Image (spheres, grey):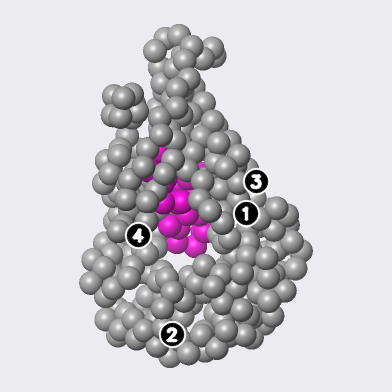
Amino acid sequence: MKISRATLHPYEQHLSEKIMRRGVWLRLENEDGDIGVGESAPWPGFGDGAKAWDFAVETAFLELSLRCSLVGAVREPPDKTLVPVHALVSSVDEALIAYSQGIRTFKIKVGRGALDEDARLLHALREALGNDVALWVDANGVWTAEEALHALRTFDTANIALAEQPVAHDDLAGMRWLRERVDMKIAADESVVTPGGFLRLLEMGAADVIVLKPMFLGGLSVTTDMARKAIAAGFEITITHALESSIGRHAAACVAASLDVPLLPCGFLGPLLEIPQVSPLVVDGMLDVESLYTPFDPIERVG
């Protein structure tokens, strides 16, 4: 396959009042006029930009070679296009909407404000949603191990099922210490993308769950390999987006659809860039991966 043209198309858009997402779409075109689009959207604290570029290049080449959705590239035949998903929520109202779609796992960001405010929200969610749902908390590494232990014990009565990145990304000893002292599962996220972090996590047994973000890991094939290694080592896995557009999000979801292993609910919902516009289809807590796909030409959209 010969590439006749390659162009870059930067984008930026507010995900919220405080969060601006920036990235670049890579557009490849062959001699027949077929196109493939990949996305590079690095994020501070999640590895280096080179891996995001690897992700963009691999995605664009795969789409160009297929001239269709990536799900057929990562799984032949593509007989599995549904993956379980969780919802990232910040209020009871948001959670109730997700609950109506059959979602039964909810992730809440904690550690950004007062601990008692986090506890109040968690208890309100438990009261509103009942005991048949799983509540996960994500601290993005803001606590020391001792602070994390205090916080998670404060949340005890809300029956938290999983705590994601409760300590700093490089404090694997602290994460393992914490894991030995709490009943909930401990998940590693930022720790996975640091140089050598993934292998050290496996060696130390510092977590129960590995969070994989293909955008920050270097592509679909790399993520698939890491997922298989984690499962073989006895860890559970979940695959999530990186707050990118649906181009990158669809590619990440295809990795989840390709794996013949049990997955914890994955993270492909939440804030979504308006360009390109998609409407993720979720039924009974399962995301149809193909609902994230749309043929997209950045030249037509942003010039």
Distance from the alpha carbon under mark 3 to that under mark 4: 35 Å
Assign a secondary structure to mark 3: helix
Residue 111 visible in this rendered orientation of the protein: yes
Q: Nearer the viewer, mark 1 or mark 3?
A: 1
Residue 71 visible in this rendered orientation of the protein: no
Q: Nearer the viewer, mark 2 or mark 1?
A: 2
| Residue in front for this viewpoint, 181 or 20 | 20
Assign a secondary structure to mark 4: loop
Q: Quadrant of the N terminus?
A: top right
The residue identified by callout 1 is: 193
In the image, what residue occupies the spot 39% across and 48% down?
Answer: 21
Q: Residue 130, relative to residue 2: is it above or below?
A: below
* Circles 2 and 1 in contact, beta carbons < 8 Å: no
Amino acid under label 1? Val
The magenta-colored residue range is 238-267
Other residues around mark 1 within 10 Å, as few (<14) / some (14–19) / many (≥20): many
| Residue in front for this viewpoint, 288 or 292 | 292
| Image coordinates for residue 212, horizontal then vertical, percent | 56, 54
Q: Nearer the viewer, mark 3 or mark 2?
A: 2
The residue identified by callout 4 is: 18
Q: Quadrant of the C terminus?
A: top left
* Circles 3 and 4 in contact, beta carbons < 8 Å: no
Residue 225's tag is: 3
Distance from the alpha carbon under mark 4 to that under mark 2: 21 Å
Amino acid under label 3? Asp
Quarter of the figure with residue 101? bottom left
Distance from the alpha carbon under mark 1 to that under mark 3: 14 Å
Residue 17 is covered by the magenta coloring: no
Q: Nearer the viewer, mark 3 or mark 4?
A: 4
Distance from the alpha carbon under mark 3 to that under mark 2: 38 Å
